[in-house]
Amino acid sequence: MATPLLSFHKDILEQIHDPSTSDLLILARGLGLRRLICTLMKIYDSPRNLVLLVNATPEEETAIGEELGIIGCRKPGLRVVGYEMGKRDRQDLYKKGGLISVTSRILVVDMLQSDIPAELITGIIVLHAERVTALSLEAFIVRLYREKNTTGFLKAFSDQPEYITSGMSPLKNIMKELQLRTVHIYPRFHQSIKDTLENRKADVVELYQRLTEPMEAIHHAIVQCMTTTLSELKRSHTSLDLDDLTVESAYFKAFDAVVRRQLDPVWHKVGPKTKQLVNDLATLRRLLTYLLTYDALAFHEYLETLVASNTISVTGAARQNQSPWMLTDAANIIFQAAQRRCYTLSRKAADRPSAVIDLVNDEDAWDALDDMEGHIRRLTAKSPKSWIPNGMDPVLEELPKWDLLADVLQEIEGEIMRQESLSSYSRGSNTVLVMTSSARSSALVSDFLSEMDSDAPKGKRGRKMMEKKLRRYLYWKGGLARQKRDGKNQGPPEFSEPRASASNTPGSSTGLSEALMKKDKERAVRTANRRRIRGGAPSSSAPSKPKEGLRPELIVLDDCEEITTFLASQSASSLNDLSVPDGDFDILKGILASQLDPDFDTRYGLLAPQQTVVVRAYSDDSDDQVLAEIQPKFIVMLEPSLEFVRRIEVYRNSNPGLGVRVYFMVYQLSCEEHKYLAGLRREKESFERLIKERGSMLLPIYEDKSLGSKAGEQIIKTISSRLAGGRKELSTQISQVIVDMREFRSTLPSMLHASGVLVIPATLTVGDYVLTPDICVERKSIPDLISSFNSGRLYTQCELMSVHYKQPILLIEFEENKSFSLETVSETTKTYAKPSTKYPAKKSGTSAESERAPPSIQSKLVLLTLHFPRVRIIWSSSPYATTDVFKDLKINNSEPDPTRAIAIGAEEDPEAGAGVNAAAEELLRCLPGVTAKNSKYVMSKVGSVRQLCELSREEVQGILGVEPGNLCWDFMHRGERKRTR
Amino acid sequence: LVIQPGAGNNIIVNTNQRLNPVLECIRNIGKEFGDIVPDFQVGRTTCILFLSLRYHRLHPEYIHTRIEKLGRSYNLRILLIMCDVTEHQELIRELTKVCLINNLTVIVAWSNDEAGQYIATFKQFEHKPPDLIKERVDKDYDSLLRTALTSINKVNKTDVETLRTSLGSFADIAKASSDVLQTLPGFGQVKVKRIKDAFERPFRNKA
């Protein structure tokens, strides 16, 4: 059902709908940008028009397609061009016209190859305009488009004003790249929006919930860790302007970008310690949000994983650079309090581990704790469950918002009854919409609601669910411990007895509808399924034993052992409760496959709209659609969200006569509250800046490029040809470079084109760029260079280039605005703290030493040149510099031949020229037994990595050869339980 | 003093480099002065010309005469550029071209230490097999798994640990459905999608 447009929507459309103008629209988030775009597209929809949608994510493509369908734009609606679509199909599609969404990379290639009639494009709609920069593909697309087509329109949209704030004149840069002259800015405080939205206001109840004591302690400790990490960072970079980095700003994701921008010019010089600090800040921020949204057990589990992955390095040895925050007292509080929220170990058990490790005089802490938690424990002590290990007292603290939610739902129920008793007809459904921040927390909340015991005292209502989770957790822990025990016992006991499907106790007292219960049943089955998979933790793998020391995780490992012993001593029958028999496995998979979008189908399709609770996570503009479909009168916002508040405003105003009540929950004095308020402020400030910039903006006048620049070039060419001794035939041809398709992910092709070189896309087997018939270039950015040295790919690539070209070149490209140097020597010394390792390979007899220190990138480069004396190296400080060098190299040389370049080396690859899934290729190459040489063959034999995993040992050997095949198969299946035998 | 070129284990240094501060930084290897055409001879067939960009800016003709004198001798000819100016882009571009025409390979260093390290390494690696930069085979399971999974964008080492402990083997991870992945701590929609893309989308589309 399409809701009517509000008056400010109409205003905006009025301004931008004209197909003869090009505009940029910046709208505040949550005010229905998608609906505007869809309406606009509907206006343009006609087989005689060719309108392209650029820069949409796959999710947005589907959502826009759906919404277009809803507002009556169905035949044929929006069609999507992905990499799976063949070249010929694409050409046909473009010819037929209509609305088409294309991936930028594909569109660039199609425009370059003239597969798309650029002059016939009616217009282009660019989403996420905030991400357009001089180097982005979208800017390249616009340039190509404007070269051939000056009459078509270009409409760009953005609802992220916060992005457009960095640099000198960010708005102007975007407009310059998109070649636009008009911009419309609509913040929430725009007069017409204010007028519209403040007509009718929703009835908002704000609920401020306090954190529980342990949560508060953890919260406090995390913030403390962030402060320490931040000051550490500042201390190590006194020269940088890091003063404006505060803990408050560190709550936001954008913070990472700010830090990186500050550190980028020296990023290659900063030691691993600094990098670690920057990463730590992100981890800590994540912990903050997880603290507020994950249940106590999941949070604890995440912490444990974090600790486990942080203590060993890539090579498996104890790590040199541990995250400093993990060693602080505050971290200790985090780890202990997190465990305390889950369970405590009673005196008898607690004594033993404390004899082994002395954590910071924890006896006192335990005493204090026991006093604090005493009342809870007395409650739990009454009914010990058989599966809980001796000495473990589950605490299972629940998130305080759950209780609040339960109360709110009760109140709503009463309210609905009251309204019904009044029997006055009112619009809207009685469905209660509960919004959460992530899919995960929404799953958690619906779990809670379905198993809630409303008679239980506060803080105990979700006991049943938490106990289930604890059980699963113990099982996971068992797996973890088994793994740590060096594979002493070979695998866990076999489970073969079938067992009744997961215990789905009907929570009839909660008053939830049947369909919802059915769904919960499915979810329970799914949980059980997950449990089953968790059981398959590797048993024979031998990770390094944790080192003895003052590490907080030791307590973790110790009770790990205990739990495992307990599990082993349990009878087989109780263990079976924890797993699902193999037979059911496939059936379960089937169920899972059939409910790809369970929320949507089961809820909107089958339910009678009676007193149901729908739990959803915030997403993007598709939330508007949800509101329009459900028409809820009661909305619970479990976590604050700026956008959703506005969506409710819009919803409220598009449905006059509908009384909406909103419950808005925030944890008091938490980062959540702060984040919400600061987010509001940030958005407002960025809008103010944009408006200011628009006021003072000087826009360049765009000359007619197709005419002016060509004439200019012609003149230069004539001159240069005379200088070259009258070789006129050269100047008549535009200089061209053949570029590998994969390279269109980088910025260089766009830069080359901007400098007037004809870019010819092709799928190359050897090299990335072919400049002349003799010169072939392999481009490596610094991270690329390091990784391809490590994987040995560069060696093979140089080998191939040397075979096929006279002049093979390795281009080492640094990033613009980043430091133009490799890691410095001094850093190598700092890292390994051994003067001798500065010079990786010592003369003789010190081979052991040189093995310890990983060889530097410089020495690898030396080795490469020694083995490929013909390979030349271009050192380029930025793509701009590369462009100049390329042009230099092309002077007085003949042009490369695309057909020949494609054919070179392609005989090994039967599918050259097809689309490529780079991520999958990369993953495949990392497998042992797969080399750069045989990877092509593997790809021709199996479709995907997953298919490779499903092959038997013999089949893998058939593809890779006996020895590598063995290696590869063992790698893929290591740590699996032998369920076939 | 005439020395058999490339015979010993020492780097042979042209006497005109006597005052070059880089000499101090060539450590852990013997050096001797000798009558050679290039600045350093670091192997039977390998030689190095040294050029500081600051010097090059003052005497742009210098390097050309040196290259000319070098003629066609030596198999691997290195031009070691010391990048000690801020406006390096133009200079390096021009030198790159000169080197390409004259069959020289450019190496850029940013400090005396780094330059010294390059020179020493060239000599030390004279007879070293390329195993170091070839594909490695002898790696332990954990680091292999880590490299493989972190090759997927957005997956970090904590996630690898999570995947391994909760799902098991590589093949199990490949089989895990999006729903299962989504429930793991630290896994959001984007990450799950990247993982699924890498594991399940076909390598090639049949265009």
Image (tube, coloured by chain):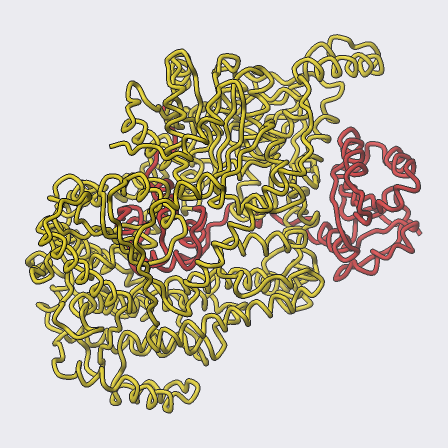
Chain colours: A yellow, B red
Q: Of A514 and A488, which appears nearest the observer?
A: A514
**Observer able to see residue B168:** no
Determine the image quadrant of residue A468: bottom left
Image quadrant for the N terminus of chain A?
top left
* Horizontal relation, residue A343 to residue B125: left or right: left
Residue shown at the point (66%, 22%) measured from the top left:
A757
* Horizontal relation, residue A928 to residue A569: left or right: right
Percent coordinates x, y for residue B192 in the rendering: 35, 47
In the depicted structure, whether residue A673 falls above or below residue A196: below
Image quadrant for the C terminus of chain A?
bottom left
Percent coordinates x, y for residue A494 in the rendering: 15, 62
Residue shown at the point (46%, 59%) measured from the top left:
A677
Q: Of A697 and B34, which appears nearest the observer?
A: A697
Percent coordinates x, y for residue A291 in the rendering: 36, 66
Percent coordinates x, y for residue A120 in the rendering: 49, 12
* Horizontal relation, residue A488 to residue A237: left or right: left
In the depicted structure, whether residue A650 falls above or below residue A75: below
Determine the image quadrant of residue A664: bottom left
Determine the image quadrant of residue A930: top left
Residue shown at the point (45%, 36%) measured from the top left:
A918
In the depicted structure, whether residue A806 falls above or below residue A216: above
In the depicted structure, whether residue A383 falls above or below residue A812: below
Residue shown at the point (86%, 35%) measured from the top left:
B67
**Observer able to see residue B33:** yes
Q: Of A611 and A850, which appears nearest the observer?
A: A611
